[in-house]
Image: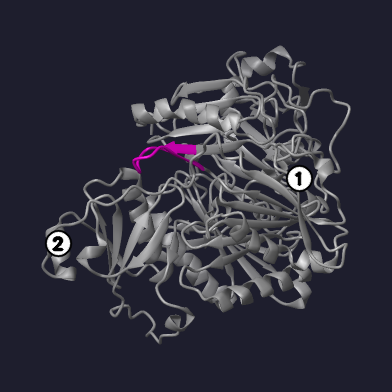
Amino acid sequence: AYDLHMWIGSKSSQDEYGSCAFHAVKLDDEYGGVPVQHRETEGYESSLFMGYFKPAIKYQEGGVASGFNHVEINDYSSVKRLLWVRGRRHVRANVVPLAWSSLNKSDCFVLDMGNTIYTWNGPKCNRFEALQATVVANDVRSNERAGKAKVKKLNTTKQLEEFLGPMVGSIAEGEPEPSRGSHNAKSISSCKLFKVSDDSGTMVTTLVSDKTPFKQSMLDGGNVYIISNKDAAQIFVWKGKSASKEERQEAMKNASEFIKQEGLPSHANITVMSQFSETPLFKMMFDDWQAINAQKGLGEIWSMNKIAKVAKVDFDASTLHIRPDLAAKHQLPDNGSGEVKIWRVEGSDKALVPKSTHGQFYGGDCYIVLYSYQPRGRQEYIIYYWIGSKATADEVTALPILTIKTDEEECAGAATQVRVMQNKEPPHMMMLFGGKPMIIYEGGTSRSGGQTEAASTRLFHVRSGFTERCRAIEVEAKCSSLNSNDSFLLITPTGSYAWAGLGASDAEKRECRELARSLGAATPKDVDEGSEPDEFFDILGGKMDYPNQPRTENDLVPPRLFEGSDASGNFVVEEVVGEWSQDDLNTDNVMMLDAWSGVYLWMGQDSSANEQEKSQQAAEDYLNSDPSSRDSSTPVYKIQQGNEPMSFKGFFQGWDHQLWAN
């Protein structure tokens, strides 16, 4: 599966935009028309695009010619720039003039002086943006200075005078960040569906419907269609499988014309997709959408008593082209059969991990995973550098430096480097361990002389991804850790059990047995949910509630996570893209989890009273504005941090009950 993004700088020329669009069409043809194309404009990028750039997207001044400046290696003394950092989850860092007039009291700034990088936080900024400014500064140090610069905080305006000269006048108050991510009830009222055809010999555009939700039968595979959403500043283009070459190639051009015809702002996002590669947001414009492999005969698919989680299906390579995903799609460069080397970070150095323990990761460690493969006979490399959730700050800091060193020593600087946080491993990384599940131990370390002794009773949560590769996370050995949607391996001094929830996939059941072999445990007894022997629950400390309602298979509505905040002055709701985990629950704000059968409002312990009040209305507006004719009676659950019900925790693999206590 592919996403192809065209990015338009605010100062780019019309000729440059035309050239960019031309090359996008060529790339689309080269990949068989499969990629979903996106037009992004500076400052108004989609959440999907922003999700690629961590910790922030950085805008540079000037055109491409300004980048061809000779610099001495390891000499950063000539670097002098000021970065204006904005955003809570999707962070933007703009280069602004190095002057007092660029500062304001509401935002955060990074003063990059080459060998030393400073952060300065406006007195009225929110603490989450202050944290993001520090993250951006650390990122500049690690990725632009090879870890050789220092990061310091400026606490007063007096300290700024050393770099900006004497202060003239006063610092501006600043303005609230625009609420691009907010939801409102009118967001679909302006949707229109148009047909684009050249059947008559000339390109003709006709209105099909201006009433949502649309019907899938309105789409004909022999033509191209455009959905224009004026209020959301968004254009969708659907290219039928049998549409003419001219219709398909003119799709982006016609969408650009629609921006003018429909009175949309010039920064409107455009998404172009082929038949069978539809995005979830497009499909939700239709109230009767059925995928070509949709399951039938299971009764009401939107059953209100089901937990909405991603459907479990066997992996089929063809589904990469027809099964969409809300997250930024991870590419699969090959099948994972190349050569793998793994190092564990130890202080400021690294130690080679024995091949016998490949795929086993400890939450207290950091690792460097080097993958070598030869597509089309050419040697290529990928380095995944993995950060354990309980790793020390020193090793987290040393990790990117050692990654760069590994790239230079092992790959001549030619590797693709991928930063991976624990529990957010991309599918390809999970395919590198010879068909064995990826194992993540709760904490501790595997380093020589420091191994953490395993508990006598251990419980592993096994969940598969769309490649059928499984991740096994060690969780607390209690009944409340179980989840009917997955499989679990319980290891005891006297034997082991492979527990299969009602919604577990065949891959998860198989991987439980493979996991037992990898850990040297006894062959597990198969235990199906509902048929457990008494000793099973006795080992787990007694029977208690756990998430126990698997949902029916449906690939249209995977769960969605949103974050709500009033830090900008307006209440803004933004989607959390990518594979999210418990760490994405921001205690400063309110989170909204759309589980289709219900909507959860999670109140962070430090969220404001206004955020909590506004979130209820936001949830109602969200349901009312859903283009798929969402049932307005869908229940909305309001829950407090630390008091999450099992039905909520079940969406987050390896829920850590002590995360916020620590």
**Can you tell which mark lies on residue 468?**
1
Q: Where is the N terminus found, in terms of image quarters?
A: bottom right
Which residue is more in the foreground, 355 or 207?
207
- Residue at horizontal 18 percent and vertical 54 percent from the top: 155
Q: Is residue 350 magenta?
A: no
| Location of residue 496 (image quadrant) | top right
Examine the rendering and report whether any part of residue 51 can be seen.
yes
* Residue 172 x, y percent position in the rendering: 21, 55
Q: Secondary structure at mark 2?
A: helix
- Residue at horizontal 24 percent and vertical 46 percent from the top: 124
> Callout 2 environment at 10 Å: few (<14), some (14 to 19), or many (20+)?
few
| Location of residue 146 (image quadrant) | bottom left
- Residue at horizontal 45 percent and vertical 56 percent from the top: 55
Dots 2, 1 in contact, CB < 8 A: no
Q: Is residue 320 above or below residue 96?
A: above
- Specify whether 225 is left or right of 82: right
* Residue 168 x, y percent position in the rendering: 12, 65
The residue type indicated by label 2 comes to Gln
Q: Secondary structure at mark 1?
A: loop
